[in-house]
Image (spheres, rainbow, N blue to C red):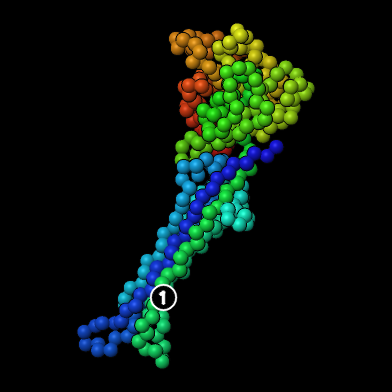
Amino acid sequence: MKFVDEAVITVKAGDGGDGCLSFRREKFVPRGGPDGGDGGDGGDVHLVAAAGIGTLADFRHTRNFKAASGRPGAGRNRSGRSGAGLLIKVPPGTVVRDRDGGERIGEVVDPGHRLLVARGGAGGRGNAHFKSATNRAPRRATAGRAGDRRELSLELLLLADAGLVGRPNAGKSTLLRALSRATPKVADYPFTTMHPQLGAVRVDAGRGFVLADIPGLIAGAAAGAGLGIRFLRHLQRTRLLLHLVDMAPADGADAAAAVREVEAELAAFNPGLAKRERWLVLNKSDLLPAAEVPARAQSIAAQIGWHGPLHTVSAAAGAGCRSLAQAVMSRLEALDAGS
């Protein structure tokens, strides 16, 4: 199954500066010639693949981009300064299309790869440019050309950086909504997500990761029970597993037993997957008195012999979600750095 992160942006290359109409005026020089300089070129707009960016989430907040225009020419044969080009950072693997015609402009694949998406306008010519043997005093200068303006469609085939696993109704979909702008179905009765959902989590500008909500695992999932191994395969592409557990189940179920059940399914499907880095995330802390939450978390961890990262959150209330996202981002960056 393919997951696509999409964004629409508008880019405007810089306009060219106008050429100057000017004649030399100096004391004791009665017949000054034309000296109008050319205008500067407008800046181009490029997309550049940047390592460390995994989603298009930043473009939900900033959608309009404009390069600098060229400066007009001036007398004394002074050319206008060209406008600075604009580099827009996107994740590697971003496919770019012209939204109006649907034309595929290109793709940025490897970090540092640039793609020209809007060309700056050429600067106008000053009247000095038109001087000739037959026209020694041209009264002609041209205006700069407008830079390209395009509406672009960006598409990124997503591979999740982190995956949410757990029993049905552990609150995975609610947590995905709390951390990203994904809108999976959530409800206050037991049910399980029927399709994997992905959300682009934006930690801060230029930093983010992709989080997958895998349908709830039940006993026998590795053998095909319930939604079966079809969705367990998606977990193989993640680098970090967030094991979500309901720490205050309404039916009084044993939280530790729920953890062991999911661990068994991961191991039955792929022993390597069971050994993948996994964090324990205890959810629904808002259903317990605040004073009881730390003791309950430590009790669950002790029952299963847990010594890895442990986070307590309330996906419904948003408590602890921000710190969890920041911790996941830092860990992913450390994995990228090889530490």
Q: Nearer the viewer, residue 3 or 116?
A: 3
Q: Quadrant of the N terminus?
A: top right
Q: Nearer the viewer, residue 157 or 149?
A: 149
Q: Quadrant of the C terminus?
A: top right
- The residue drawn where x is 53% and y is 54% is 151
Residue most extreme to the top: 252
- The residue drawn where x is 52% and y is 30% is 179
- Residue hosting label 1: 142
> Does residue 143 appear in this view?
yes
- The residue drawn where x is 49% and y is 15% is 286
> Does residue 209 appear in this view?
no
Relative to 191, residue 66 above or below: below
Is 22 on the left-hand or right-hand side of 331?
left
The x, y position of residue 49, in whole percent, is: 55, 49
Relative to 28, residue 249 above or below: above
The x, y position of residue 133, in whole percent, is: 41, 91
User: What's under tag 1, amino acid-wise?
Assistant: Thr
